[in-house]
Image (tube, grey):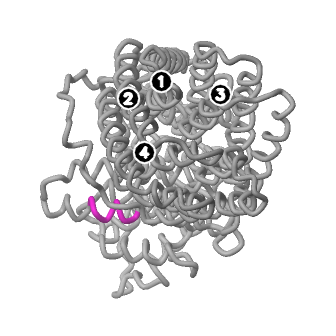
Amino acid sequence: MSSATPTPTRVRRLPVVGPLRLGRPSDVWFKPALSVVAAVAAPSLLLMTLGRLDLAPYTMAGSLCALYAHNRPYAARAKVLAWVILGMLGGLAVALVSASLTRNAVVLVTVGALLAAVQKVVCDATRVGPPAHVILTFVSSATLFVPQTLGQVPGHLALAAAAGAWAWLVGMAPAPLRPHGPERRATAQALNAAATYAETARGGEEGAGGARSAAYAAVHAAWQTLLAVRDRPSTTRRALERLVVRAEVALAAPADADPARLRAWARAVRGTGRIPRTGDPRREDEGLRLNGADAGVDGADARPDGANPRRTDSGARLGGDGTRRDDDRLRERDELVGVAAERAVAPPPLWSRLGPLAPVAVRSALGCALAGYVSLALGADRPYWALVTAASLYQANITLTWSRAVQRVVGNLVGVLLFAAVTPVAQLGPLALVLCILACNFGAEALIGRNYWLGSVCVTPLALLVTELPGYQPTGELVTGRVVDTLVGALVGFVAALAVTNRRAGRRVERALTAVDRAREHAARLAADPMSTPAALEAARRGLAAAVVDLRATADAAAGEWWQRALPQERVVLAEQAAHRTLAATVRRQGLLPDPGTTSTYTHTEGASP
């Protein structure tokens, strides 16, 4: 697949109403909502019974780690949650020590801005995912302005660590009941998205382009989930990989796809029963040659007439539906072999992913620091609100950054009104305060999937209620301070996003796509050349697999950066598909995979771009 010309830069109007439109809630919105409630409730209620609710902000820091990694397989989730907890403790330690050594607000804002930059870069480099650095920045920035002594720091860190350990247990609790739940959900979403695109494309409906982009994004997300664990895949994970490949086949040929079957697979995958059976393409070459059976769910899709369409010398079937089905099956087998080759290559080290994020660090540090300084100049007592607002803005492109600013401002303004309404209830007593905090935690995670501003409506009173855990404070001052700091943080943060650009992100994706194309073409030539040496084939295979891994990492990193061009998500997925099939041809040429029985299978599967 040849490298395409870069998408030209387009100047777009910044929307105001569009960012506030509500979307559909996540299919599993209740999982993070219930997890954070369980993680926060136990430590908070324990401290309340001990009469030390003033220590709840420190346990809250650890409890909020339960928000992370809900889309990861449990083996990967265990590691991610552990690293998030350690990262939270590291930021909290720096903040607590700084707060105990100085009360100079300018110094504390500077420390908070530098911490926010480090947290942003590390979360982008490691692709932690939502809520990414925002929670970590909120925790560290808020504790910077809580009076401390050095002697109190170890105890406060111990409270946060204990709550973090509890949050880890909460996050891992569903594993014994649904050990492959995240992978199943991601696969079901890919199948449903592919079905939606097939329906819109077949009917010529308006919006087919958007459905196609959404489907490719869902397929890419499914592969990210399935490849998050790099050990030898289980039987269940192999079956899910075959279903994701079927979703890719539907994207490549929507007119031939069966949306009903895709949706039936998706429904079956969501449960806890058997994975729908599509057949193992790596073991069914003989079956393809003998009888053309196309096993679907429980084998119900075998050809009813028992026909055995005639084969040509090239190994390709003739006979209408049989040709399409065999092409799909060969495509599925080769894609899975390519995925296995990609899994065998280790991801690039963390240090190599940090360097390209230098502009992100500069922008975050500058925006957060300036927001905090301006807030101080206006007489604010809690400049960290402005700092956190600025840190939360930076998205994949300038339009999305603007949209996040609009959502943040609207959500916070409505949120302070909600806080004013619930304050009389929260001040009835410690139990009422804890219950209000739990309700806000649940509401934030339940609503944020529909739109960020709607979740912010609950996040804002949550943050304000946490400030009242050590003691009740005047509601008017809290509301006024939050409104001013929100406006300051949004304005200054957006200006910083305009001032510090990172055009390299787009160019890196283009270079990664070009590298995959060149590696694929080189491997294809060697696979087709009967005189190729085993050493050359092995070097080409490893080079192509490494290029695919680098493309996936580069595209993921660019998704956390803003630039004027849209991320070429579809081109990334198509390049991955073509590379996987070339990897399969190379592996077969090396004798590591049984040949389908023809000398031109490589031509049959690689002759055209997907």
- Give the foreground label among 3 and 1: 1
**Crowding near the residue tagged with mark 4, few <14, some 14–19, many ≥20 C-alpha atoms within 10 Å:** some
Give the residue pinned by disc 2: 484
Q: Measure how far apart labels 4 and 1 are at the Cα level.
A: 63 Å
Q: Is residue 38 visible?
A: yes
Rendering coords of residue 318 (x, y %): 31, 66
Q: Are marks 2 and 1 in contact (CB under 8 Å)?
A: yes
- Quadrant for the N terminus, please: top left
Q: Are marks 4 and 1 in contact (CB under 8 Å)?
A: no
Q: Nearer the viewer, residue 156 or 298?
A: 156
For the magenta stretch, what is the residue range? Answer: 191-197
Give the residue pinned by disc 3: 144
Is 212 covered by the magenta stretch?
no
Q: Amino acid at mark 2?
A: Val
11 sits left or right of 336 in the view? left
Give the residue pinned by disc 4: 606
Q: Nearer the viewer, residue 381 or 263?
A: 381
Which of marks 1 and 2 precedes in the sequence? 1
Question: What secondary structure characterizes most of the magenta part?
Answer: helix
Helix, strand or loop at label 3? It is helix
Q: Is residue 436 above or below residue 79?
A: below
Q: Amino acid at mark 1?
A: Ala
Q: Amino acid at mark 4?
A: Glu
Which of marks 1 and 4 precedes in the sequence? 1
